[in-house]
Amino acid sequence: MSYQILKFTKRKLALLSLMLVSFGLQAADLKVGYVQVDKILQEAPQTAESGKKLEKEFGPRSQELDRLAKQIKELETVLEKEGVTIPETERRTKERDVQNIKVEFQRKQRELREDINLRKNEELGSLQDRINKAVQSVAKSENYDLVMYSGVAYAADKIDITDKVLKLLGKK
């Protein structure tokens, strides 16, 4: 019985060795590339365009928040200076007004942050689609079998196609 197990194991080892050699021969023809996504996100012209678009879209709301912050500071300064000289009811009214403006400021600030984050995510999604298409285009035009761009611990410079992808993104 042990002879049959040994014979069976030898067959498995021979088959496994043959498969590994076959894979090694196929891997020799494999063309692999790597893309640094963080570099593309920093250097792609679409990133700057996206930033300008968001700045233009949310600039007025940001300026409104700046005006509200300035108004709050001015009211607090006036309240500090006049706080002891004005009647108690008037002081309370002004304090309440300042508090209401602060609450409004915080609400608008939170809404602006949320809206900016949503738009940034939309823009990032659109940019990622463009990057994917550019990577696929470079990979197909240069006959790459495999291109990786996420979760790579190390990649040699000779397989880095980031600059080719950036060049393609710059043309669009």
Image (cartoon, grey):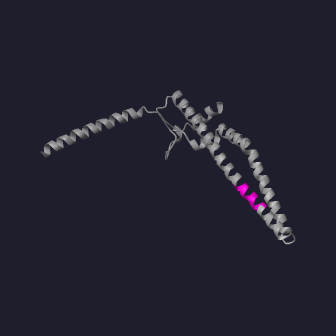
Q: Position of residue 15 (x, y in %)?
A: 26, 37
The image quarter in which residue 75 lies: bottom right
Question: Residue pushed farthest front?
Answer: 89
The residue drawn where x is 46% and y is 32% is 145
Q: Nearer the viewer, residue 119 or 18?
A: 119
Task: Name the side, left or right, on which 119 lies relative to 27.
Answer: right
The image quarter in which residue 123 lies: top right
Magenta span:
97-106
Q: Position of residue 135 (x, y in %)?
A: 55, 34
The residue drawn where x is 76% and y is 45% is 60
Is 95 rendered above or below residue 118? below
Q: Position of residue 69 (x, y in %)?
A: 77, 56
Task: Name the side, left or right, on which 14 lies relative to 116.
Answer: left
Q: Quadrant of the C terminus?
A: top right
The residue drawn where x is 82% and y is 70% is 88
Q: Nearer the viewer, residue 147 or 72?
A: 72
The residue drawn where x is 61% and y is 40% is 122
Secondary structure mostly taken by the magenta-highlighted segment of the chain: helix
Is residue 109 shown in magenta?
no
Q: Nearer the viewer, residue 80 or 55?
A: 80
Q: Position of residue 137 (x, y in %)?
A: 55, 29
